Image (tube, grey):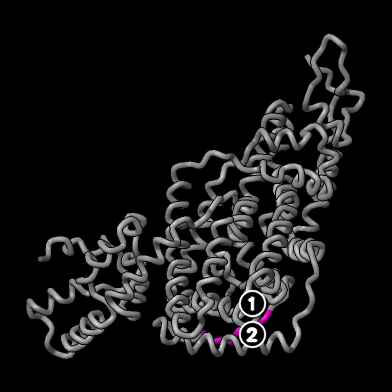
Amino acid sequence: MSDPTGSHRDDQPNDPMAEILRQLGLTPGADGQLDLNQLMARLQQQMGAFTSQATSGSGINWERTRHAARQVAAGLGPDPSITAQQQRDVADAERLANLWLDEACDFGELPRGAVAWSRAEWIEETMPAWEQVTEPIVTNIAGAMGNLMGGQTAQMPAELGAFGAMMQPMLRQAAGAMYSMQLAQAIAQASTQVVTASEIGLQLLSTPRAAVLPTNVAAFSEGLEVGDQDVLLYLMLRESARQRLFHQVGWLAPQMLALVEHYAREITIDASALESAIDIDDMGQMTPEKMAEISENLQGKLFEPTQTQEQVEILGRLGNLLALVEGWVDEVVAQATARWMPNSSLLAETVRRRRAAGGPSEDVLKSLVGLELRPRRVRDAANLWAALTADRGVGGRDAVWNHPDLIPTAADLDDPLAYVSGESNKPVVDDLDAELAKLLAEESGDAGTPEAEGDRGQRPTGDEGEDDDPKGDDRG
């Protein structure tokens, strides 16, 4: 039987819970009983170190995380404030880009003008999106830490059965403090690499607008035999095209972020790595500063390397969407620059090589959610969009984005020509307008005929899925 004081004879194993309580500064009295009031006070003191710093239910102080990301970014290189001339250059580039894009795509100009940002401004503007994506991670880390504690608290006396529940808030705050350091470092690193607001392929802005980071654009331009204005214009074309797509296709950006968030919820924390980094017997030292040190030791080790089947499926869907978005941007910009920018092929190749190397999208997503995502099929997607342009024109190509059920699948990327020919009889923009006109006519007095009923059944809307109409498969 263990000595409740935590001391033990050489022939007795140490009582792990007695050791934890000792680290918390708690020892039984002369009668061998614990002072529960002392235990409660000590726990409240420990939790206060974390709860005073948290600003969300996840346990992360987002204000401090944002500040830390900016500090880390500042340490990675100069981040000068944007000058008035840089803002004018960006505005001029957007005006010309809009003229070219109006002919190359069916989506109109953005409601807000383009802007030049420093790295710090990119961090500020994108932080809300990172909050949404990473909240599930902190929950999983806290759960893993709770499981580690659970094995210890199970050995406690029955009168302390609520000890584990009392520890949960502190564990959640500790998980937030530990993960926030990784978060700050990953976002800061990305801010030194991205040349535009949405280069990683996701919509990180609450309101679509084209944004360029001149400091990073200058680094991108080094070694290229292309003028600075051409480089800026080319990157503006890509950013404006992508932001036009996100603005006009309302379902696209939320679905992509939701897939990343879903992937994060399915993550399994590597309990062995966590246990080796956290000395569970040293609870008295579990401070925010200690959590930051643990976070640094866990870089690259926090997530289980094995993906679940659900994660594999999510990864496939997200990779397909990213490839389609980037392939569409490639095709649109190629169309826009064909007549006016002879050196665009060099810039396009530079972008392809940058993307093939991983780039900021792979780095930040791997660091934050353990998601190794490199859209390897962008070239296939670009070929498919080019084939659609040739077959249907710009309007017909862009009409494919009208509903998620219409967009190409991974199998379609294997055979773009088959997709184009197979989908050519499906309704596109003009057909949808005609069907809507028919429906309006029917409602004004012509409804009720067999023809009207058939037309109504075939009319696709933005709200119905492929299985919503059980009669749809029986019509000839």
Q: Callout 1, which amino acid?
A: Val
Q: Report the residue at 35% width, 59% height from top.
A: 413
* Distance from the alpha carbon under mark 2 to that under mark 1: 7 Å
The label number, if any, that marks residue 16 in the structure image: none
Please say if 358 is above or below 201. Answer: above
The answer to whether residue 149 is above or below residue 445 is above
Confirm whether residue 6 shows in the render. Answer: yes
Q: In this view, does 13 lie above or below 151?
A: above
Q: Which residue has dot 2 on it?
A: 90
- What residue does disc 1 label? 212
- Which of these two is toward me, 334 or 176? 334
The residue at 62%/49% (across/down) is 139
Residue 84 location, quadrant: bottom right
Write the start and end of the magenta stretch as one range. Answer: 110-116
Classed neighbour count for the residue bearing mark 1: other residues with Cα under 10 Å, few (<14), some (14–19), many (≥20): many
- The answer to whether the residues at label 2 and label 1 have Cβ atoms under 8 Å apart is yes
Task: Examine the structure image and report whether residue 115 is included in the region drawn in magenta.
Answer: yes
Give the farthest residue toward the right.
Answer: 30
Provide residue 166's location: percent of width, then percent of height: 72, 43
Mark 2 is surrounded, within 10 Å at the Cα level, by few (under 14), some (14 to 19) or many (20 or more) other residues, namely many
2 or 1: tag closer to the N-terminus: 2
SS class, disc 2: helix
**306 horizontally vs 60: left or right:** left
